[in-house]
Image (tube, rainbow, N blue to C red):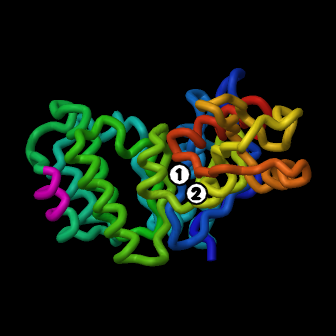
Amino acid sequence: MHTLTCRNVVRKMGDDFTLGPINLEIPAGTITAVIGNNGAGKTTLFQALSGDYPGKGETNILGHNIHSVEAKAAFSYVPQTFPEVLPFRLQQLRDLHAAHDDSWQDDRFQAFVHEFKLPLRKRINKLSVGMQRKTVLALQLSRDTSLLLLDEPFAGLDMEGQTQLEKMLLHKMEEDPNCSIVFATHIADEVGRLADYIVMMKDGKTREPMEKDSLAQQFKRIWLAKSVTGVEEAPGIQKVSIEGALPQILTNDAEATEKWLAARDAQIMKRESLSLHESLPLLLRDEETNGV
């Protein structure tokens, strides 16, 4: 079962940038991190997924077209910026949701207000950037929806707020095992702590979702007993260096690299999976070199 599906979604943003075509499926019960370098199109993707911009193709949420009433009621969206809410007070927005939004969970909202220490009667544009984001998060997470679209949700939050939000998102997944969360981020730690899948973006296009845990199998540091002629040309090789007396290689395809080494009777002394801090930049660099 897929919570979100996109078929040939294209959004043209002026003369300089085109999103898509995007073909994407987000399974129910998963958390997906969307990553990419600045200008890759992450925010434009989230705007398109939420139905903000017209264009070609089709986006469905739980089988309903994104522009239908059923789809709108099934997802919550926290954009990177939210100028439309800034003139209001949180109490006003709460009252609006409570009166007109069937998905509204007021007990959940009151818990978020308490957790984030949010002022109800102060205009949102008078709050700090971090408190503004907490306000919008509280409003959207208080809706009982099956899909959360979060564009850089941790940006601007203090350390306590980041921890609180992480706990809230994980609690949401425990509470509703069929819920899906899609979030954009630049931070490897956020990917490591939350994501099941990773979607790469480059030049307005996405790559098929990959399992986060598969990166630990693909990206490795390998120490050899001695230098191997031609190792720089082995499949997957990213870097060759010497650490002490042992040659060291970085690979983005450990299986293929080790098969190449075995065919040359090379002795592996040690192997180690790369952290996401190391593997994600290499992955992004490969996308820049090879394209999505």
Q: Residue at x 8, y 45 (%)?
A: 121
Work out whether residue 96 can be spotted: yes
* Percent coordinates x, y for residue 165 in the rendering: 29, 54
Q: Does the magenta portion include 133?
A: no
Of 188 and 25, nearer the camera is 188
Q: Secondary structure at mark 2?
A: loop
Residue found 64% across the figure and 44% down from its top: 221
Please give the label number shown on residue 212: 2
Task: Name the residue furthest right.
Answer: 263
- Which callout, 2 or 1, points at the residue further toward the start of the chain? 1
Residue 97 spot, x, y in % from top left:
27, 60
Q: Is label 1 in a helix, a strand or a loop?
A: strand
What is the crowding at mark 2: few (fewer than 14 residues within 10 Å), some, or many (at least 20)?
Answer: some
Residue 211 appears left or right of 130: right
Q: CA distance from mark 2 to mark 1?
A: 9 Å
Name the amino acid type tagged 1.
Answer: Ala
Q: Is residue 123 left or right of residue 260?
A: left
Instruction: State left or right for residue 170 relative to residue 109.
Output: right
Q: Position of residue 280 (x, y in %)?
A: 58, 41
**Residue at the extreme top:** 15
Residue 33: give its label.
1
**Label 1 CA crowd tier, 10 Å (few <14, some 14–19, many 20+):** many
Q: Is residue 36 above or below residue 64?
A: above
Locate residue 107, reporting x and y percent: 18, 71
**Amino acid at pointer 2:** Lys
Q: Image height check: is 223 above or below 87?
A: below
For the point 42% across and 55% down, the residue is 193
Check contact, mark 2 vs mark 1: CB within 8 A: yes
Residue range in magenta is 110-116
Q: How many marks?
A: 2
Which quadrant is the N terminus positioned in? bottom right
